[in-house]
Image: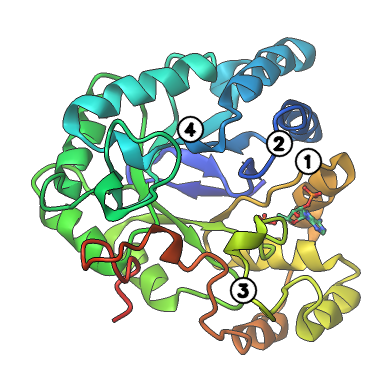
Amino acid sequence: MKKLTFRDGDKIPAIGLGTWKSDPGKVGDAVSAALETGYRHIDCAAIYGNEAEIGEALQKSYSDLGISRKDVWLTSKLWNREHKREDVIPALKQTLSDLQTDYLDLYLIHWPVAFRPDLEGFPRSDDDYLPLSEVPLTETWDAMLEAKKQGLIRHAGVSNFSIKKLKELIRHLGEDPEMNQVELHPYLQQKELLKFCKEKGILLTSYSPLGSGDRPERLKKEGEPTLLDNEVILSIAEKQEATPAQVLIQWAVARGTCVIPKSTNPGRIDENFNSKEVDLDEEDMEQIESLDIHFRYLDGTVFETESEMYRDIFDEG
Ligand code: A2P
């Protein structure tokens, strides 16, 4: 399995199992199946509401497979409600307890958006948010670095950050983010962000690599393009004797990113992992490059406010 190297030389397996939308009752079996297949990277988040079940499955798999905690890369994410300095480490400790571990390999600020600490569920009005002037991203970042200093996390990063927002943290005294996890697939190739992150020694993880077809309906747009039945992807899959999902996963790996396809189906979990056998050539890469239409499946509008407080979350102008 290809690995990506952090600034300190640490290595993360390029393919991880995504767990967003993996329902309680299914996610544990998915994690067990993935570890049995050979995955050693599981991508989690507190807001997915399934970390306790993942923690149970990890324990069982460690003993069933004769592996230990240190053999598996665990990533999780800080939810929007816990951005205040004093809330970061308690939120992290809840995740550690749910995942039944005493450290994470990587912890990310999930979104550059802060909710009120007492908010239950998702915001219903602007009053449910805290402006970044009140809880600056630099404050949250400081607390992430404190967690690292305390040995609760081995690496710290962010998710859904634009170049502009990364620059705010990079200018800040202390350590720069080590990872940015963003939506990335052939329709949204993130070329500028990828270039910027490479220059700064920040790794990228590609989420929704298969087009996230199981998103809730409210997050879907009418007539949105699909990736798994794109003609170019289908023809490359045929040529490579691979499946469309395997082509999409290996395209992300070939571009030097981590990729976290979600599945709760054992056959597809296996298929996605075995994409490592697929070797895309230059012509395949060129053809896929032509597919960029700058289309987001998750456009961030779900976190926009009526007022100017949170608008244009990806700073696209
Ligand atoms: P399932 O969990 O039933 O396998 P993304 O990773 O972009 O969020 O996409 C996840 C969606 O893609 C889920 O609906 C998942 O369904 C589906 N999926 C995962 N792997 C494959 C595959 N190899 N072929 C087709 N669909 C897949």
Q: Which residue is pictured at 25% across the width and 19% down the height?
A: 150
In this rendering, the answer to whether 208 lies above or below 155 is below
Q: CA distance from mark 4 to mark 2?
A: 13 Å
Q: Please name the residue shown 39% across and 50% down the image.
A: 124
State the CA–CA distance, disc 2 to disc 3. Answer: 23 Å
Residue 182 position in % (x across, y down)? 46, 59
Q: Amino acid at mark 1?
A: Thr
Q: CA distance from mark 4 to mark 3?
A: 26 Å
Dot 1 surroundings within 10 Å: few (below 14), some, or many (20 or more)?
A: many
Asked whether the residues under the numbered discs 2 and 1 touch, taking CB atoms below 8 Å apart as contact, a structural biologist would say yes
What residue did someone put label 2 on? 23
Label 1 within 8 A of ligand 1 by Cβ: yes
Mark 1 sits on what residue? 264
**Residue 152 seen anywhere in this rendered image of the structure:** no
Q: Which residue is mark 4?
A: 46
Residue 10 on image: x %, y %: 42, 38
Q: Quadrant of residue 174?
A: top left
Question: Which is in the foreground here, disc 4 or disc 3?
Answer: 3
Nearer the N terminus, badge 3 or badge 1? 3
| Nearer to us in this view, 96 or 8 | 96
**Viewer-side residue, 245 vs 117:** 117
Residue ID at (18%, 31%): 85
Query: Which residue is the site of mark 3?
Result: 221
In this view, which residue lies farthest toward the top?
A: 63
Distance, label 4 to label 1, CA atoms, is 18 Å
